[in-house]
Amino acid sequence: MNGNQTAEETRKKAIRLFFAIWPDKETRMRLGRLAGRLASACEGRKIKTENIHLTLVFVGEVNTSQMTALYKTVDEIKDSGLRAFDLPIERICIWKRKNIVYAEISAIPQSLIDLVEALQSRLSSAGFSLEQRPYKPHITLMRNASCKTLPELAEPMVWRAREWVLVKSDRTSDGSVYTQIGRWSLEG
Ligand code: ATP
Ligand code: MG
């Protein structure tokens, strides 16, 4: 890197990041099948099976020099006794204001809130400016959706969250491509 970077060059080096919970293979396949069933009831853009996730905190565009601060923040959190949790899913819902169809978490575990709050407060202290809206956990299955009916789950499912991940999001002509660049365990 030289000292004469233009703002444009700096922007290009920035990467788009978010913290998330990623489904295990079985949960991913089940949610993927559910998203597939939505395609017959809804118009819109189905989320690809490999992209289905639960966002914890959206960090946004981060440049190389901010990565040290980001990993320092993770170091402060990763051994702080955050507990694993289960995400019960019983219902598919539509969020009219955002035009998304999502799998609802029917009971929000306190350990999920603890993880999100730890990330939010440490990241804010480290100088990252985060979304101010209250956290509303949801698993997006379709965007720009308009649905005649919503499918019902044949039976309730439970997504067991045992780790959290840091994900890079790249905009491509084929949509967003996500790459996990960090992964940390939850206790229990
Ligand atoms: P695309 O933007 O191409 O439709 P995407 O929204 O899945 O795809 P990103 O915009 O990189 O990809 O977002 C990554 C994750 O972060 C998604 O779960 C998205 O809903 C969430 N997210 C994006 N922007 C924000 C924001 N401003 N506040 C909160 N969450 C956000
Ligand atoms: Mg987006």
Image: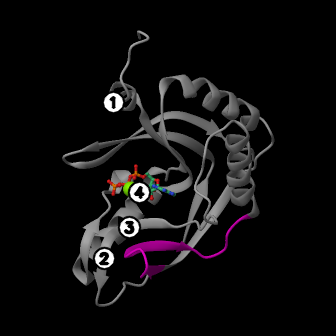
Query: Which amino acid, by three-letter code, is at mark 3?
Result: Leu
Instruction: Identify the residue at image location x=41%, y=74%.
Output: 98
- Judged from the image, the secondary structure of the residue bearing numbered disc 2 is strand
Range covered by the magenta-colored residues:
92-109
Q: Which mark is residue 8?
A: 1
> What element does badge 4 sit on?
loop
Q: Which residue is mark 3?
A: 141
Pick the front one: 25 or 51:
51
Q: Is residue 132 magenta?
A: no
Please rate how many residues cluster around mark 4, counting C-alpha atoms within 10 Å: few if below 14, some from 14 to 19, many from 20: many
The residues tagged by marks 2 and 3 sit, at their Cα atoms, a distance apart of: 10 Å
Of circles 3 and 1, which is in front?
1
| Disc 3 to disc 1, C-alpha distance | 34 Å
Assess whether mark 4 and mark 3 are in contact (beta carbons under 8 angstroms). yes
Instruction: Name the residue furthest bottom.
Output: 148
- Image height of 166 relative to 141, above or below: above
The three-letter amino acid code for the residue at tag 4 is Ile
Q: Is residue 169 above or below residue 150?
A: above
Identify the amino acid type marked 1: Glu
Q: Say which element carries label 1.
A: helix
Find residue 52 and name its label.
4
Q: CA distance from mark 3 to mark 4?
A: 7 Å
Of tags 1 and 2, the one toward the viewer is 1
